[in-house]
Amino acid sequence: MPDTPQSQAPQPSDAATPATLSAPWRTAPGFAELGAQFFTRLRPTPLPAPYLVGVAPAAAALLGWDAGIGSQQDFIETFIGNQVPDWADPLATVYSGHQFGVWAGQLGDGRAIRLAQAETATGPWEIQLKGAGLTPYSRMADGRAVLRSSIREYLCSEAMAALGVPTTRALSIMGSDAPVRRETIETSAVVTRLSPTFIRFGHFEHFAAHDDVAALRKLADFVIDNFMPACRDDAQPYQALLREVSLRTADLIAHWQAVGFCHGVMNTDNMSILGLTIDYGPFGFLDAFDANHICNHSDTQGRYAYSQQPQVAFWNLHCLAQALLPLWLPPEDADQEGARDAAVAAARAALDPFRDRYAAAFFRHYRAKLGLRPPAGGDDKSDEPLLTSLFQLLHGQRVDYTLFWRKLCGISSTDASRDAPVRDLFLDRAAFDAWVADYRVRLRAEQSHDAARELEMLAVNPKYVLRNHLAETAIRHAREKDFTEVDRLLAVLSRPFDEQPEAEHYAALPPDWASGLEVSCSS
Ligand code: AMP
Ligand code: MG
């Protein structure tokens, strides 16, 4: 149970408080149409004396709201979970999953409660409260989220969207001083997340583990019909679904690598069926480049290190494939060797495009980051030596990843005397000189025009990313009830590719104190 003192804990308030927040869209059953075995209907557990920490203007706009709506008490009461508007049909979904490579059995929305599916001009959006109280899937935990991790999820969801990385969104964050016990006593918060669906690989694993092929098929049909209708045209729609998820996941991970994002806890229950970044916990952006960077202090083996993310995604896709297999291998045929081999081969064929798609997306991102055109003849890997030597150099010198790319934008293809801003990031200048000489050869080979290339590179190499110390500073202020830094940081991160002269310090190297920051699964 949460550590909320009973004297403070309000009772479910829908009877007492009019639930008047009106919405400029209609709702659809969405996930609820799947039926009772997929979820439990329940109400959020109220929190005392809620306050607004922030509303994300871009996410509010997706729902047709102005960010000013955050000042309405109805908005606060709704999105902390204290009142349930008439458009809501709150429920928590059941899923299972593999955590750190091991089957973990049933998990589920232990603290997330879906309010509704909004049908908006910008598409369908499931509206979900995270940290809104106990559910049947809370296991031994308290159903709550702390202010610290909620601010990180809120900021990073919107920062990733602004970077162009597929992600769930964050509408708002509300706080309450109701205490929550983690390593220390912290306070509560609720982030309202938006996503077309929150279905994870783990939802499929759940019904596969229960040998419930009918439910599995229902879930697959739901995803296909609502989000991947082209799969229906395939002779094998469920294999097409697996292939589509593989491709989306390949694109997603290549994008993560390119922006230097480490998820930190890539368990199969944290893998979106839509190929979105989901469940921001112990994530981190690279500061000094370390290919083996582990952002999650709880990940003692480095299973989810930066360099491991593509392999782990592929491993997770194998879990999904295993779960989907009964959809094209009926249980009555599962003991027949021939049928089984054919079904497994079909699964492999649906997963295999991951490799080429990942490689293509990887080279597309990094060529754009380098300001290079695709090579004539389409040999995707021809720039591999240039990139490999760059990664070795960045890794060896522990060069700041974001600053390196941003400063590289200003390089000249002919004039080495302009190298200083980027060259000064390297301790071993000679090593940089050797690499940049090769890069210049490549630039001149395609008659690259410096000014045009600089503009293109500035549009793909962000100046601002959510470094840990920036989030930490916003959290420290927020703990003192000053939320202006959350707002300011959100505004800066919403324009990550723009020069923002007044925000220069947000683009600087992390301060010394940041090296002591540890981010763990505790949230
Ligand atoms: P995560 O590692 O945050 O992705 O969470 C893994 C599982 O634990 C999911 O089923 C979560 O819903 C659940 N969970 C994590 N924290 C809590 C909490 N404080 N209360 C209830 N369930 C939680
Ligand atoms: Mg999770």
Image (cartoon, helix red, strand yellow):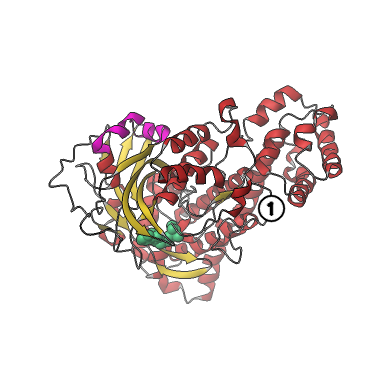
Front in this rendered view, residue 390 or 372: 390
Query: Residue 99 vs residue 352: left or right?
Result: left
Q: What residue type is disc 1 on?
A: Asp
Q: Secondary structure at mark 1?
A: loop
Q: Residue at 56% across / 63% down in the picture? A: 299
Quadrant observed for ligand 2 in the rendered image: bottom left
Front in this rendered view, residue 46 or 120: 46
Binning the other alpha carbons within 10 Å of mark 1 as few (below 14), some (14 to 19) or many (20 upward) gives many
Q: Position of residue 414 (x, y in %)?
A: 84, 27
Does the image show residue 203? Answer: no
> Residue lying farthest left?
15
Q: Where does the N terminus fall, quadrant-wise?
A: bottom left
The residue that label 1 is drawn on is 290
Residue stretch rendered in magenta on the structure = 56-75
Q: Where does the C terminus fall, quadrant-wise?
A: bottom left
Q: Main secondary structure of the magenta part?
A: helix
Query: Residue 187 vs residue 460: left or right?
Result: left
Front in this rendered view, residue 329 or 5: 5
Reply above or below: 485 against 279: above
Q: Position of residue 416 (x, y in %)?
A: 84, 30
Q: Position of residue 89 (x, y in %)?
A: 24, 48
Q: Position of residue 498 (x, y in %)?
A: 58, 28
Residue 59 sits inside the magenta stretch: yes
